[in-house]
Image: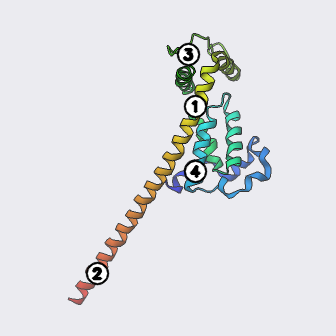
Amino acid sequence: MSRKFFKKYLPSHETIRRNRFVALFGERLQHHNLWHLHRRSVAGGFAVGLFTGLIPGSNPVQFFFAALFAVAFKVNLPVAVITTLYSNPFTILPIYVVAYEIGAFLTGGTSNGMPEVGLHLMDKSISEWGPALIDWVVSLGKPLLVGMLLLALLLSSTGYFAVRAGWRLFAIYEWRKRARRRRQKNEQNMSGMDGDSG
């Protein structure tokens, strides 16, 4: 992956440091891996974001845990925080259905879809969605919690290796492109020299 790509779409070091949740970490934010864009730190940040994105609660809660894990594992903090956004009000229900199915299969429960448990968000204000979602998650019990943990582990490990592989493939592609350009330039110089000698 190109550093330019990440620099274009990620918030700056200062923007992240000014965030009130991230500011709780103080001096721990000085480690260079938290901000540098290299294969290991970006892959680690992506894995942390995929894992913490499944923590029940609103985005600030997930941002806080993403920052906490990024600091603990010394991986790219902006990548970790931004990656949590894959779980949002539009995607969370399908993700939880998949997690429930995995959990029901592993705990020996019946996998006939999630039980009919009311999640009535339409009659609530947006500020009430977080608590309503948490109550709904708790009511689904062990299959959902087991499934969420396993899905988070699966997503984070898959994401980690996918980013590392993608980064390596992109680096090989760029290296070959530069080598091809150098070869073409050398060939042009040689043909120019042949023309001059003629």
**Coordinates of residue 139 in the picture (x, y in percent):** 66, 15
Cα separation between marks 1 and 2: 60 Å
Pair 4/2: label in front:
4
Q: Is residue 16 visible?
A: yes
Which comes before the other along the chain, label 4 or label 2?
4
Q: Amino acid at mark 4?
A: Val
Query: What residue does disc 3 label?
Result: 109
Q: Amino acid at mark 3?
A: Gly
Q: Nearer the viewer, mark 3 or mark 2?
A: 3
Dot 4 and dot 2 residues touching (CB under 8 Å): no
Residue 87 visible in image: no
| Number of numbered tags placed on the structure image | 4
Residue indicated by mark 1: 150
- Residue position marked by numbered label 4 in the rendering: 42
Determine which residue is flagged by label 2: 190
Front residue of 124/23: it is: 23
- Which sits earlier in the primary sequence, circle 1 or circle 2? 1
Marks 3 and 2, how far apart in space?
A: 73 Å
Which residue ends up furthest to the bottom in the rendered image?
Answer: 197
Tags 1 and 2 touching, CB below 8 Å: no
* Residue 145: image location, x then y, percent: 63, 24
